[in-house]
Amino acid sequence: MSTREWDFETTVFDKEYITLAGTREGIVRGGRDLFDRLPRAFEGINQIGVIGWGPQASAQSQNLRDSLAGSVKVVVGLRAGSSSFEAARAAGFSEADGTLGEMFEVIAGSDMVLLLISDAAQAALHESIFAALRPGATLGLSHGFLLGYLEQRGGRFPEGIDVIAVCPKGMGASVRALYRQGAETNGAGINASFAVEQDVSGRAVDRALGWSVGLGAPYTFQTTLRSEYLSDLTGERAILLGGVHGIVESLYRRFREQGLTETDAYRHSVDCVTGPISRTVSKEGLIGLYRKLDAAGREVFGQAYAAAYPVGLELTHEIYDEVASGNEIRSVILAGERLARFPMGKIDQASMWRAGEVARQDRDDARLPLDAFTAGTFCGVMMAQIDTFIEKGHPYSEIANESVIEATDSLNPYMHARGVAYMVDNCSTTARLGSRKWAPRFDYLLTQTAYTATNSDATLVKAFEDHPIHEVLRICAQMRPSVDIFVQ
């Protein structure tokens, strides 16, 4: 594990330190009481252009507009002829007042440009976007994909501009939903990381923190743009989406083979993961989930955990290597070029997901089973991702958020309300491609090698019980939103 001390300097916000597993990290707590500091954070910025209207762009543009309350103009930029113009108008942006326009005109007219179009579009258009930026502008990203793409091609960001990132640890719908649900609650929102890739103005840190606070982040922690894209791309292919997709499909079939009905098999697999497991881990951590089980349940948990952890560790390391080598980024770009001819289909018509539609119709959350085998399997893969990130030197705030908090506080509640299939069919193109590629690997290895060898390994279970992530999650839980996300 890297011994780097994660630290930064800010002249606008109050920095504090937390110590996670022996590493000191500087953080900034958010809150609506800080919104009056935003004009100072954005000093020298008269217009923020938010480019795109996908889940992150639509959420972030509205949150920033509401938080800034006119002190800095927020303008949405879209491709000429985009079908998203109507949705942006419905959200209160308009050509008439200059808050909605063609993307390159908005880029050229903005002092700070938040580039929130798809990863493939960023790769395809980056040269034109860079050329349109004002001298001395600030370029903001919410994902490090473009850095990875540039590194592959021997490219770089333009000199003479600030390059920063603010990366909410949740889907765009969660960023907006928790901001709105927390309108009367100080600090309700989605945690975010920030990174400064280039600081020409000397104001990059404060602008990044202002952006994060304006989005409603309860706390903001530091990372690097490279560290972010490595953990983000790996995470969405592992426990955040691809892994959980493969886990629940394998468990559902296992329970059906044991004689459970379609509805009961769905309750013990998907509903159990997205419901009681996620709710417990969100507030009590992984160790809190384990302690909730009785002695017999802990024995079953241990058997499943010891079987699933090695599979999770092998696959998460493989995914990480594919991302770090550039193979996964190349795969996304190549797939994007094929999509016009070979569009992605939906998975929601498979029998398991049709059974889920039926199961959700009369679901009583208070009576959902906390299945010990499901809990052990899910936690085994989640802990494998945690250990991979520790080995690769990521900061503990990033590890906790990318491996646990984003799953339990943002993604899984949406999957619980609408189904894992809904998430796989409706998230970003990069995440959808990753899930389709890696979920079958998790499914296959769990089914073929893990479930056939479920003998409790006391060494692995003891390592789980003593793991430093439990104290990390306890500290992070003190900064979680006091408002739980609600999804109809």
Image (tube, rainbow, N blue to C red):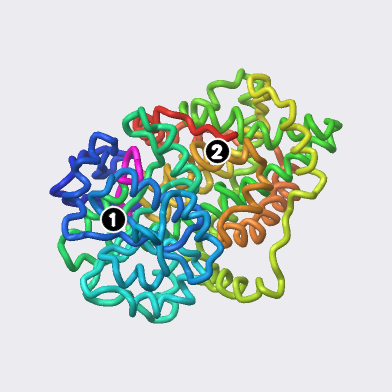
Q: Residue 153's image quarter?
A: bottom left
Depth check: give the residue in front, 1 or 344: 344
Residue at horizontal 65 percent and vertical 75 percent from the top: 338
Depth check: give the residue in front, 40 or 153: 40
User: Is 139 placed above or below 385 here?
Assistant: below
User: Is 272 placed above or below 226 here?
Assistant: above
Q: Which residue is mark 2?
A: 460
Mark 2 → mark 1, Cα distance in angstroms: 54 Å
Q: Residue 99's image quarter?
A: bottom left
Answer few, some or many: residues within 10 Å of disc 1's Cα (few below 14, many 20 plus, some between 14 and 19): some
Say which amino acid is labelled 1.
Lys
Question: Magenta part of the protein: which range?
Answer: 213-223
| Residue furthest left in the image | 11
Answer few, some or many: residues within 10 Å of disc 2's Cα (few below 14, many 20 plus, some between 14 and 19): some
Task: In the rendered structure, find residue 268 and report the number of the disc placed on it.
Answer: none
Position of the C terminus, as image quadrant, is: top right
Q: Left or right of 386: which side holds 312? A: right
Q: Which residue is mark 1?
A: 73
Residue at horizontal 60 percent and vertical 71 percent from the top: 336
**Element at badge 1?**
strand
Q: Left or right of 398: which side holds 266? A: right
Q: Left or right of 321: which side holds 45? A: left
Residue 148 in view here: yes
